[in-house]
Amino acid sequence: MDDYLIGVLSNIGVISFIALSAYVLLLTGEISFGQQAFFAIGAYAAGVATALWGWPLAIAIPWGAAIGAAAAVLVGVPTLRLHGLYFAIATLAFAEMVRILFELFRYQILVDGEWVGPNGTDGFGNIRYIFENDIDAFHFMLLIYALLVATLVGFMLLERSRLGVIFRMIGEDETLAGLQGVSVARHKVLAAGIAGALAGLGGGLYAHLTTYVEPRNFDVMLGVHSLAYGLIGGLGTAFGPLLGVLIDIGLLEAVRAVAGYRMIIFGGLVALLLIVRPRGLLDETVVHRIGQAWRLISART
Amino acid sequence: MVDLVQNTIDGMMIGSSYGLLALGFTVIFGVMRRLNLSYGPSIMIGAYIGTFLYVQLGVGPFAVAGAMVSGAAIAGIYVERLCFAPMQIGAGIASMVSSFAIWMQLEQAAILVLPRHTYPFPPLTTGALLEWGPFLLRPDHLIVFGSAVGLTAGIQIALYRTRFGLALRAIIDNPVAAHLVGINVRTAVMLAFAAASAIGGMAGFLVLAVDQQVTPMFGMWATLKGLIAMMIGGLGSIPGAIFGGLLLGVVETHSQWYFGPQIRDLTAYVVLFAFLLMRPSGLLGLPPAPDTASPQKR
């Protein structure tokens, strides 16, 4: 594989995590404009762990996910009392606060005679773990996809479990779910925690993939994109947001010929798509039909 | 003490244009119950048309204002036709994501027409600073404040003294009932969208004439500032939008003066976050009904 393809594929893999993060909240019926905050927190936490504290990647990545989840639960407890637009704007405000705090955050130590660490708006460079440990780009890509496949298996189990049903139930009608004896508040905070962990995991991988992060990477644009992926790809299955990422990054990379017009074409296509399919390409109906067809085929053989 | 008063005056002058931005946003949200993320970018399209005429033909500020208001209104109608009118009931999030896709489209269109990063924008006036005791007033600030007050009064009259205003208030109150009493909801919503984008265009013109430059980032800036001021003031409240804008302007000017631009932006979001947690209805809005703006209901 050539380096360019590996780069694009790695990017798609990493962005998929933040798309899945927004998708978890969409399942419970909440829109978040702020998942980039936990992506940023994961990126900085994991980056600091390897580059400054000398931790191995195998611990730093889960650490980033854990910090992301902890932050998401802390914010989730007060904000999840809000609904709809109020919740969406609260997540936006929080994410922008986090971004600006990273612009002010300086924490550097001397590593091998060189100052390393987050340095405000100048960003956080030299997250060189994968070079120092001779992991080439191809193997790092395999690591990203191994984690992504594991996450997807987790999602498939979730969709079949009682928890998955409860999430969708809350998303369908919160009051009704509460009347059925579901603890709505607790499950929403749990969903926020899972979403935070996924974003933090993706952030940690992103920091090590690019070796350099700066607060500007984590602006509102990233958050709204990750929300849009689920809506474009479909809300019926965890493969929906992945399809969204693939369409956005993959297709746009493929049509470099029309570089200057790509957002004009893409934006228009998405707007038209959402008129025909307001819950995305792989919505609940399509997923249900695929499931039925699959059962029919497997019953015959 | 002089600083405190001076900053408050400056903040209110700037805040009045935020209030106008929030006002356009509130009208759109009121009639649609959906969030139009392309609100700012529609204004930016107007600004680019205005600055194109200014750079290429050298027209004056009045012509630029006219071009900007009509450009924003046309862009607003485009967004309404594509992202809001064809969407079914219950597809509120789809409308919002669709308006985001169109935001990307409008931003790229603006860059295609005028590819440089910044373009000059005509100043309102080149008059000298006015002195008033120990305080200084920028003449362009005064024009901004005066225009904002005048426009707000005009909008208030249009909403409460005209048939169209009555129809809009009926739609805001209950779209189904409005339809049943013979109001053409679809046309009225489209006109409201155009009017709201035009108000935004006027607000954007006042902001840019003070800054005297325009960049493609202005779309995002206008959406965010309008959104913050609208939420602080109280979703759906017209006086709330104005007071929210004024409060945002004053808070921003003070924190900029004492702590610099980064803390200024941080403070704006902290105030917004605190309002949402402790008083989601904002300064003057009604308490949020459990299902208003909830994604699965609209």
Image: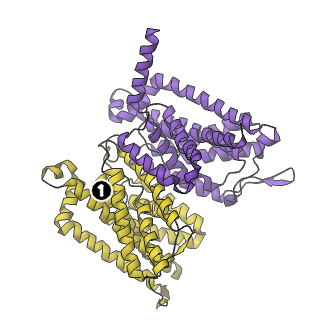
Chain colours: A purple, B yellow
Q: Mark 1 points at which residue?
A: B30
| Number of numbered callouts drawn | 1
Toward which corner of the image does residue B199 lie, by quadrant? bottom left
Residue B181: % across, % down: 12, 52
Toward which corner of the image does residue A246 lie, by quadrant? top right
Q: Is residue B69 left or right of residue B119?
A: left
The residue nearer to you, when weighing A80 against B191, is B191
Classify A158 as above or below B203.
above
Residue B292: % across, % down: 32, 47
Q: Which amino acid does label 1 sit on?
A: Gly
Toward which corner of the image does residue A11 lie, by quadrant? top right
Q: Quadrant of the N terminus of chain A?
A: top right
Secondary structure at badge 1 equals helix
Q: Is residue B7 left or right of residue A177?
A: right
Question: Can residue B25 be seen by looking at this rendering?
Answer: no
- For this orientation, the residue located farthest to the front is A257
Question: Can residue B39 be seen by looking at this rendering?
Answer: yes
**Which residue corresponds to the image point at 48% horizontal and 68% vertical from the top-left?**
B251
**Which residue corresponds to the image point at 18% horizontal and 69% vertical from the top-left?**
B161
- For this orientation, the residue located farthest to the top is A301
The residue nearer to you, when weighing B245 against A198, is A198
Residue A299: % across, % down: 44, 10
The residue nearer to you, when weighing B214 against A57, is B214
